[in-house]
Amino acid sequence: MKPATGYASQPKAMDPRSTEAWALAEASRRLILAARVTDDKGEAMRAALVLNQRLWSIFQASLIDPASELPKAIRDNVLALSVMVDRHLMARLGDLDGSKIQPIIDINRSIAEGLSMTPELAADATMAPVTPAQANPAPATGKHAQPFMNLTA
């Protein structure tokens, strides 16, 4: 059984933050689907892991770009996180063990969730508890959207 190769969904808003969040969610979805495939000698898992590796490589390149508008502290933290993701990805590419992909999925989903928040809500998240109305805000679009990592470059 091969996993679906098409996209389950596509980003609704065409702003960079939404695209980045969607890409991470899609990469996680593909890992989950690949873990369910047992009759292809690990090819689906390898493809999903390589997709994740490419995505994180794009993020890393964007984060080390001197023109990045992100604060240095955030860039440094995400780069450190990306090193951990790289280690997990390389280990899984070595053994193709789908039962050990949860850390990668968790990181992808956490970053995607943060990117899906409006910038104002993200800034306030550390200062005030989130109310139920704020729990699922729409992503910022248009001139208010700022990319976390530039996937379109």
Image (cartoon, helix red, strand yellow):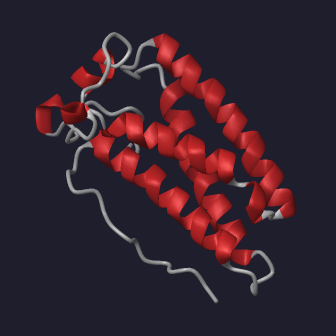
**Percent from the top left, x then y, of residue 52?**
60, 54
Which residue is found at the position 22% from the left and 50% from the top?
A: 14
Instruction: Give above or below for 20 relative to 75.
Output: below
Would you say 21 lies left or right of 82 here?
left
Which residue is found at the position 47% from the left and 37% from the top?
A: 111
Question: Where the N terminus falls, by quadrant?
Answer: bottom right
The outermost residue toward the front is 132
The outermost residue toward the right is 95
**Percent from the top left, x then y, of residue 119?**
26, 25
**Percent from the top left, x then y, of residue 8?**
38, 71
Would you say 71 lies left or right of 93 here?
left
Q: Is residue 150 visible?
A: no
Q: Nearer the viewer, residue 92 or 133?
A: 133
Quarter residue 142 falls in: top left
Q: Is residue 146 visible?
A: yes
Quarter residue 112 falls in: top left
